[in-house]
Image (tube, rainbow, N blue to C red):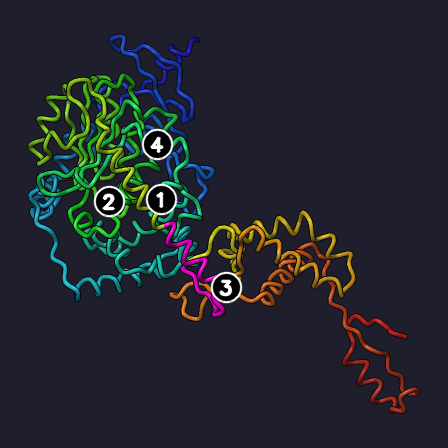
Amino acid sequence: MTDSTARHKRRRDISGAGTFFRCPAVCQPDPAVVVDGGVDMSARNAATAIDLSSDSDTSSGGRMCWPSPWDPQYVEKAEVRRKKAKISDPDRLIAEELNSLSLESRTRNFEEIHGVATLIEETEESIQRDLELLDEKLDKLRKRGAYDTALFLSPKFVKDPKFRLSFLRSEEFNIDKAAIRMINYFRAKHLLFGDDALVRTLTMKDLDDIDKEYMRLGAVQITPDMRDRRGRYVYTSYGKYNDYKSIESSTRVAWYLIEKIIQNNDEAQRHGLVVIMDIIDDKHVYNPLFGKSSTLSKCMRIRHVGVHLCYDQPAYSPVISLLRLAISQESRLRMRIHFGSRTECYYDLQTYAIATDVIPISQVDGTPKTAEFLEYLECLKEEEARAQSEMEERRRKQQQSIHPICIDRPDPKDIVLGKGRPSHNFSGNVRLSEIIDATYLDMYEQCRHGDKGAICDEIVQHVHGWGGRFLKRCENELDGWLVVTNEEARGKVSHTIRSKFKAQGKLRRPTFTVGVSASSSGVGGRDANAAGSRNRGRVRVSNT
């Protein structure tokens, strides 16, 4: 049986809008097959989607992957929602969902998409009250994953009122949803950028060479000048450059660019974000843009007030129908589909307060306009270089100071003192443990007792040699971390070595006692028996 025949046998009509395949989730593209009308359909799958409800932060092996509409996970979600609603047409489903909303909610949803909604009124009293409620809700949540790691590394960053306010605004001050979004934010950020960038502002150094190359193509763009008539920022994504090899790169670049826009920008946080996905002239039936926007909308600290998908390939229709059935109700109600040429789609976007000149894609040849975007990237690079230089200067002055040094957060090269999994799993502590295992553990075990301190000193100097510091929490956790003395650092190293011996069953704690006899000490037999009963069960080593 040929591959093409096997695929035809697995056809299933999911949404009533076309014929579907259930392809296995793999990272490599499947061979092209010819289906209805001879359309070339290359079903591209993007491995497994990030599981935002899972407690594990390594559900995708440490890589950020996005779901394919052909993935069984998407198909299953679409089937469940279709059966529950007894509707296979996404347009009918959306109509039913709109009818189930209250008049106020339905009106606000319509006004937000068209850019005429009134902003939620904010007062200092209401903001303070909601921040306190958000703190209480976060304390009650369990299985917080990367959020707990971030809270351990920098409580000042996580508990910053302005930072937390952005999550409240993204959920229109719904406390429960804001708490879940904050948990998802740290989980996704940890998967994308790791521990190092978890509790600090992102910079271009957090992007690898492939990410930077992809960013300079202009496939995803957002700048301070890209706004609609309402003043909302517009994020555009150009589908032709989003092949399966660049899913992770496009996601990291999108996260970085959007974070730069909303950072300390109250106006952007209050108005929300408009997303435009242009997949016109893209010949592939699956594009990673489908899953990425829906998943990012659950993680980032800005609300997607409208998502516009522009396409011109009829083969996309069944995929888009399946996508609209699989995503959440909130995302589905805010998505608008535009079919036709690029000129027709962009003309249609004007009815949603989006001017044509805001979209950085040429209507003539369909290529991204990158001149202004590249200029904006150079400005960001210069600002980040200045900030980095100022931070290094502050650190140099702190190291020369004779007073105790407090820092905001540990670096990956530092060693943190403390108990529990966060300190044990910190990158610097893991590196210290590996060095002790590889070089010093056997040496420490075999040396004399008087030489053990010298080995601990050598390990401390080794850590200082790679630029690491030994840190402990300040009395007020919001003040950050304190650089400890060399004596405390030696104690940390010694404790780490003893813990390893204890785990291996090599640590012994004998009690040294001197045998006492009634005849030699002149003590009566009753006292000798009492002394023996007190020492019963201990390990005795005779010194005679």
Is 406 a magenta residue? Answer: yes
Residue 67, disc: 4
Left or right, 208 with respect to 318, comes to: right
Left or right, 53 with respect to 227, comes to: right
Compared with residue 368, is residue 407 higher up or lower down, i.e. above or below?
A: below
Q: Secondary structure at mark 1?
A: loop
Compared with residue 71, is residue 403 higher up or lower down, i.e. above or below?
A: below
Left or right, 15 with respect to 33, comes to: left
- Mark 1 crowd level (few <14, some 14–19, many ≥20, 10 Å Cα): some
Q: Secondary structure at mark 2?
A: helix
Distance between the alpha carbons at the discs numbered 1 and 3: 26 Å
Which residue is the site of mark 1?
203
Residue 292, disc: none
Q: Quadrant of the C terminus?
A: bottom right
- Mark 3 crowd level (few <14, some 14–19, many ≥20, 10 Å Cα): many
252 or 544, nearer to the observer: 252
Query: Could you tell me the amino acid type at mark 4?
Result: Pro
Q: Is residue 29 visible?
A: yes
Residue 11 spot, x, y in % from top left: 32, 18
Q: Is residue 317 visible?
A: no
Residue 356 spot, x, y in % from top left: 11, 29
Distance between the alpha carbons at the discs numbered 3 and 4: 44 Å
Distance between the alpha carbons at the discs numbered 2 and 3: 34 Å
| Nearer-N-terminus badge (2/1) | 1
* Residue in the picture at 9% in, 27% down: 348
- For the magenta stretch, what is the residue range? 388-408
Residue 163 spot, x, y in % from top left: 28, 55
Query: Could you tell me the amino acid type at mark 3?
Result: Val
